[in-house]
Amino acid sequence: VSTDFAVDAQAWRHLADAQVNVELDTGDMILNLGPQHPATHGTLRLVVRLDGERVVSADPVIGYMHRGYEKLTEFRTYPQVTTLINRIDWLSSFANEVPFMHGAELLMGIEAPPRAQYIRTILTELSRIATFMVFLGEMGIQVGALTPPFYGFRDREHVLNLIEAATGGRFHPNFNRIGGLKDDLPWGWINECRNTMKTVFDACNTLEELLADNEIFQARTRSIGIIPPEIGAGYGVSGSNLRASGVDWDLRRDGKPYLVYRDLDFKVWTHPDGDSYSRYWVRLQETRESARMVVQMLDQIPSGPIMAKVPRIIKVPEGEIWVETENPLGQMGYYVISKGATGPFRVKIRSASFSNVSILPWLLRGVYVPDIITVLASLYFILGDIDR
Amino acid sequence: LADDLEREQSGAGEEAERELAKTDEPAAAAHARTDADEADAPPTEDAAERESRPLDETEQELLARLERGLSDGIVESSDAFGTLVVRVKPDAWRQAAEVSKQSLECDFLSFISGIDWQPAPREGEEAGGDTSSPVQPTEMTFGVAGSAGRMQVFAHVQSTSRHWGVTLKTDVDERDPHAESWVQHYPGADWHERECWEMFGVTFDGHPSLRHLYLPSEFEGHPLRKDYPLLARVVKPWPGLVDVEAMPGEESKEEEQAADAPAADADTSAEAVKGDGS
């Protein structure tokens, strides 16, 4: 597949033809979308060139929220870095901490005890559910349905309560330590979690009936914003967005082993279409799958310590390591270079949304103005994850 | 031991940054003297052992394919915790992307970025009098697969079908940093190269439009280079002791502490960490 954009022959009929162009001036119009547009979840600015209702070119302008985390990590000790990386993708903060901690532990040659690994995995999956709940509801509001976001946000609250009960923070847990976790789970948490998973299954069913099966929703999302797998991979689009294009690749199953995913029985969902609808559908299935995984882990969770034996001063030996994990938004990776000090020498943060959004200039060419919003929403990005 | 850890690393949420900076550093310095040997010695040896381990089958296969495609373009290769790291000659950089995509089946571009191996100035005027951050070694050393000089460009590509990946590195001249662009092979390289250009000042030949990505277009300098100071620390001494102005007529205890604390801490932490570092 060539990267050049080819317009469907049928679609050309909708364009203003050459004759009209002579009589009336239908020159391109520049539409500035954002940086404060509600569909951009923050401050993403799109400069869109329009020919009538159709997008000729789109240029995302990012950086309104650039905080320079790669530079800041060079001025922090390893335990302090978690505070920063919590704020990269703020909807799934816990999942951001995991790869960095994993990398530092590998460099130091220590391993978190099994119970800590299980709790980490449970909390990572809970973060995924919480993140996707927002998406599943909010996708509705982008196509004009006001009800789904209320359901989505209401049910996400149950999951956030669980995370808060275990870690003390709703959004920024800062719960991981090198070699384990800060605390064990509180009393009664496991039962509470089991009940909440039932709520999650119910919420998925509700949203599926309410939104995914809805005719209007399907008309607005089906065969719109199609990402072919080769193009998506070339742009570095990852996670659910790539799986919705039929690529059967999930780092939890296919990457280097991390956490306890090797002990779990789970399915990797894919969809062959690659359009906005399939991205919604895949995330819906993955929310259910995550809830199933949490239930499995609650049954299997071993007892034991939650901290490995770690020196009092965290000094990471010289070396470099690439760690990647399957985060809710896609592939999250850290390239950590250590020179044997108490802080990292250089950390390259590979965040999922940055690459997911970099495909927009290609993807938006040829879509209609109202579809810009649905395509943006279906890619599902977090501004902090783009700008870092 | 666990208690100590907890105390050192305590502090969550918004205040954590400030908290940690205050509590962690002096604590670390205090412990460093007493626990130096038990803290460092064993892991260092482990890491050295693990890093020098031979390539596994997948890595050998990847390296063989790269060698076939690039012939003498490869300078050095090594393993970094299960990931193959290959350093290629600067003039084989674009070709390395082509070979990765065609014969390694690495269709997925994870990232492209740069490394500045020069140690950052940590004391004195240049660093804004900053003595609070971790002390790095002062001599320039290079990581896995080596480097010819201060500046390097590196990238990670992966295969969505074979589930393997490889990290590629190349050297760039530090006075006039240039590298070949990957845009024609990986369209996603566009943004990554723009980022690398503004952060490290590496020009990518063949890139369609190198312009600022994150920073405003009038921004000068390359922030991720090691000789670029962290401006926040230049403007205000860390750990932000005078965050809040005292109310008129209120001479707070904190200010008195502020006067004493940083000097003492700075000395001990620098000494302690340097003393047992090697």
Image (spheres, helix red, strand yellow):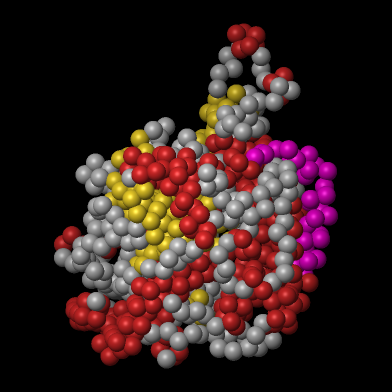
Q: Is residue A8 left or right of residue A181?
A: right
B80 or A135, which is in the foreground? B80
Q: Quadrant of the N terminus of chain A?
A: top right
Q: Is residue B262 above or below residue A149?
A: below
Q: Which corner quadrant of the image does residue B237 belong to? A: bottom left
Residue at left offset 39%, top offset 60%: B78
* Residue B158 seen in this snapshot: yes
Q: Give the magenta range.
A: A199-228
Residue at left offset 29%, top offset 54%: B147
Q: Is residue B39 above or below residue A266?
A: below
Q: Which corner quadrant of the image does residue B7 belong to? A: bottom left
Picture coordinates of residue A202, whole percent (x, y)? 80, 66
Q: Is residue B255 left or right of residue B104?
A: left
Picture coordinates of residue A108, whole percent (x, y)? 41, 76
Q: Is residue A165 above or below residue A373?
A: below
Q: Is residue A40 magenta?
A: no
B264 or B119, which is in the foreground? B119
B99 or A94, which is in the foreground? B99
A50 or B223, which is in the foreground? B223
Residue farthest to the left? B124
Q: Is residue B25 left or right of residue A270?
A: left
